[in-house]
């Protein structure tokens, strides 16, 4: 319902339509947008624009303004507890959700779909399992109309509450990682290891560190022994580089199996990264990395590593789920993770 009020009495009221400001020869355009909530400092400006009276929206007890709605939607999407998110101030009816820490963005996709099936609201996010940095915008929400029935917002809040929140930035754990470089040519000093520095850098980027390194020849028994020594030393993750193909002298998978580790998968529907192996010895993840990790900016390792570092234990089904989006386009300038790779 529209109501005409004196400008001096309009603070806190909601503008019913746009107001244009004209400065001859300098400016002509919208100064105040429909839906703007009048602030004390706006009064002098409106009077200078020649407005003695303005029309405002008179909200009923069961109506919600777009700014209030957007903030309630954002808070509902995050839920209670340690969600790793902050909320921007409402601006033109929109609220952004920003990461307050480095971590992996986790989206409950079915609940997100249910939210967006509710009329008159929208909630858009980055992809699920997107590695994000503190301060990064990860989602945005707003009311579509200027005003909506309170029941719509309450319905969305109920969906989010039942799901236990639908957006979260899961923090990375800081793990002690053991790195085993396989290859007789490296072991005997014929060539310099170029694989290890790449893996160390990727692990360090997520806040963990390679605490112990070993170089072993292409021998399944030696690989098994190195894994066992890593576990005895307390390593919380073991990564092996090289020897992952089906060539007869590539025996890293056999060495992992001999260690008694439970193999989740040998092979992944990801290019680059098809010859990837994931196994577990108790709670310790063991990963066998194919040679592509050394040469490509983004591979299967980049898709799986952050999920393990936030405490997930990927299943064979999870790895199979990487197939849609698992084909890297090898762009001239890699933009991962801001691309389709790994985003099924």
Image (cartoon, rainbow, N blue to C red):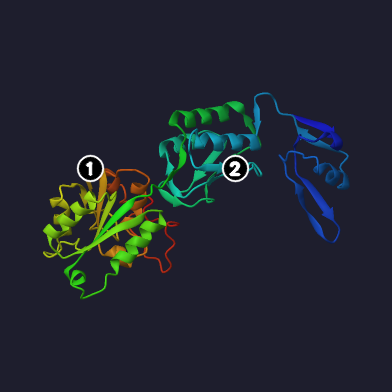
Count of marks, rendered view: 2
Residue extending farthest to the top is 61
Q: In this view, does 167 lie above or below 25?
A: above
Q: How crowded is mark 1: few (under 14 residues within 10 Å), some or many (20 or more)?
A: few
Camera-nearest residue between 328 and 240:
240
Q: Where is residue 272 in the image (x, y as percent from the top left)?
A: 30, 61
Image mark for residue 36 = none
Residue extending farthest to the front is 233
Q: Is residue 1 left or right of residue 172?
A: right
Q: Is residue 216 left or right of residue 193?
A: left
Image mark for residue 95 = 2
The quadrant of the rendering that contains the N terminus is: top right
Q: Is mark 1 on a helix, strand or loop?
A: loop
Image mark for residue 282 = 1
Q: Is residue 193 left or right of residue 110?
A: left
Q: Is residue 205 in view?
A: yes
Q: Where is residue 325 in the image (x, y as percent from the top left)?
A: 35, 53
Q: Is residue 289 in view?
A: no
Camera-nearest residue between 62 and 44:
44
Q: Upstream in the sequence, badge 1 or badge 2?
A: 2
Q: Position of residue 342 (x, y in %)?
A: 36, 53
Identify the residue shown where x is 42% and y is 40%. Answer: 109
Identify the residue shown where x is 29% and y is 69%. Answer: 194
Residue 72 sits in quarter: top right
Identify the residue shown where x is 75% and y is 40%. Answer: 17
Q: Is mark 2 on a helix, strand or loop?
A: strand
Tell whether label 2 touches label 1 (CB within 8 Å): no
Q: Is residue 344 left or right of residue 178?
A: right
Camera-nearest residue between 91 and 197:
197
Q: In this view, does 66 lie above or below 260?
A: above
Q: Residues within 10 Å of mark 2 (few under 14, many from 20)?
A: many
């Amino acid at each position: 319902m529209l109501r005409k009020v004196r400008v001096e009495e309009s603070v806190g009221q909601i503008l019913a339509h746009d107001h244009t400001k004209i400065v001859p020869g300098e400016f002509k355009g919208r100064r105040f947008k429909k839906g703007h909530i009048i602030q004390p400092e706006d009064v002098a400006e409106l009077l200078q624009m020649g407005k003695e009276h303005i029309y405002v929206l008179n909200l009923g007890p069961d109506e919600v303004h777009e700014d209030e709605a957007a903030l309630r939607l954002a808070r509902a999407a995050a839920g209670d507890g340690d969600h790793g998110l902050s909320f921007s101030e409402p601006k033109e009816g929109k609220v952004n959700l920003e990461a307050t820490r480095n971590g992996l963005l986790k989206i409950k996709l079915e609940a997100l779909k249910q939210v967006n099936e509710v009329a008159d609201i929208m909630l858009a996010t980055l992809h699920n399992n997107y590695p994000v940095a503190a301060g990064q915008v990860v989602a945005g929400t707003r009311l579509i109309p200027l005003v909506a029935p309170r029941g719509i917002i309450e319905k969305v809040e109920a969906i989010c509450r039942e799901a236990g929140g639908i957006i979260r930035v899961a923090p990375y754990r800081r793990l002690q990682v053991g790195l085993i470089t396989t290859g007789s040519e490296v072991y005997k000093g014929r060539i310099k290891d170029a694989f290890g520095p790449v893996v160390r850098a990727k692990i360090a980027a997520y806040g963990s560190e390679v605490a112990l390194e070993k170089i072993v020849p292409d021998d399944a028994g030696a690989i098994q022994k190195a894994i066992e020594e890593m576990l005895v030393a307390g390593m919380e993750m073991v990564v092996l580089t090289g020897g992952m193909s089906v060539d007869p002298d590539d025996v890293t998978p056999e060495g992992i199996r001999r260690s008694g580790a439970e193999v989740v998968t040998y092979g992944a529907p990801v290019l680059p990264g098809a010859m990837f192996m994931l196994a577990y010895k108790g709670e310790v993840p063991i990963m066998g990395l194919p040679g592509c990790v050394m040469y490509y900016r983004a591979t299967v390792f980049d898709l799986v590593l952050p999920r393990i570092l936030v405490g997930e234990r990927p299943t064979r089904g999870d790895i199979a789920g990487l197939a849609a989006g698992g084909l890297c386009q090898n762009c001239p300038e890699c933009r991962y993770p801001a691309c389709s790779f790994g985003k099924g």
